[in-house]
Image: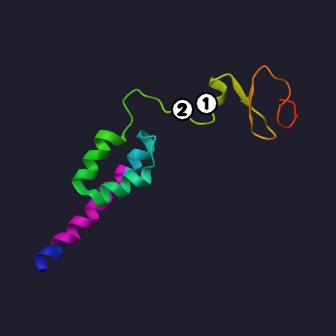
Amino acid sequence: MVEVAAWLWLFVPIWLIVSVLAGIDAGKNSSQNAFIWALSVFVGGILGLLLYINLGRDQYGEETTAASDLPTQRGLTTCPNCQSLEDTEREVCRVCGEPL
């Protein structure tokens, strides 16, 4: 029993560090929630780490676009007053009437 406790004292902090590093990596290289990946690596062990490596990271060269950039890419602009999406050719918001 003492040997098991000694191994746990060694294994748990190391695995906690591995899961935190996976969470940090997920924050940089994944479009999914980094906390969930860190938790799944900590709870899931080696299987969780393998799942993160295979499924959690975005493909190399694939850029994740910020949500604020999407409306302008589609030819839409956001109303400064009501935040509705409007066509870039419009001069007045169709919802609140504010000038764009």
Measured as percent of width and height from the top left, residue 79 is found at 78, 35
Determine the residue positioned at 75% across, 36% down: 84
Check disc 2 and give the amino acid type: Thr
The residue furthest front is 95
Q: Quadrant of the C terminus?
A: top right
Looking at this view, name the residue that lies furthest to the top.
Answer: 89
Numbered range of the magenta stretch? 7-22
Q: Secondary structure at mark 2?
A: loop
The answer to whether residue 77 is left or right of residue 1 is: right
Q: Does 93 sit above or below residue 37?
A: above
Q: Are marks 1 and 2 in contact (CB under 8 Å)?
A: yes
| Res. 36 image quadrant | bottom left
Q: Amino acid at mark 1?
A: Leu
Q: Identify the residue at horizontal 82%, vertical 36% (top origin).
A: 95
Q: Is residue 11 magenta?
A: yes
Identity of the residue drawn at 35% across and 52% down? 21
Q: Quadrant of the N terminus?
A: bottom left
At x 49%, y 33%, the residue is 64
Q: Is residue 28 above or below residue 88?
A: below
Tell which circle, 1 or 2, labels the residue nearer the N-terminal end.
2
**View extreme (bottom): residue:** 2
**Please, what is the dominant secondary structure of the magenta stretch?**
helix
Q: Is 55 colored magenta in this rendering?
A: no
Residue bearing mark 1: 70
In terms of image quadrants, where is residue 14? bottom left
Q: Which mark is residue 65?
A: 2
Q: Position of residue 35 (x, y in %)?
A: 43, 54
Mark 2, Cα crowd under 10 Å, few <14 / some 14-19 / many 20+, is few
Asked whether, in this view, residue 5 is left or right of residue 96, the answer is left
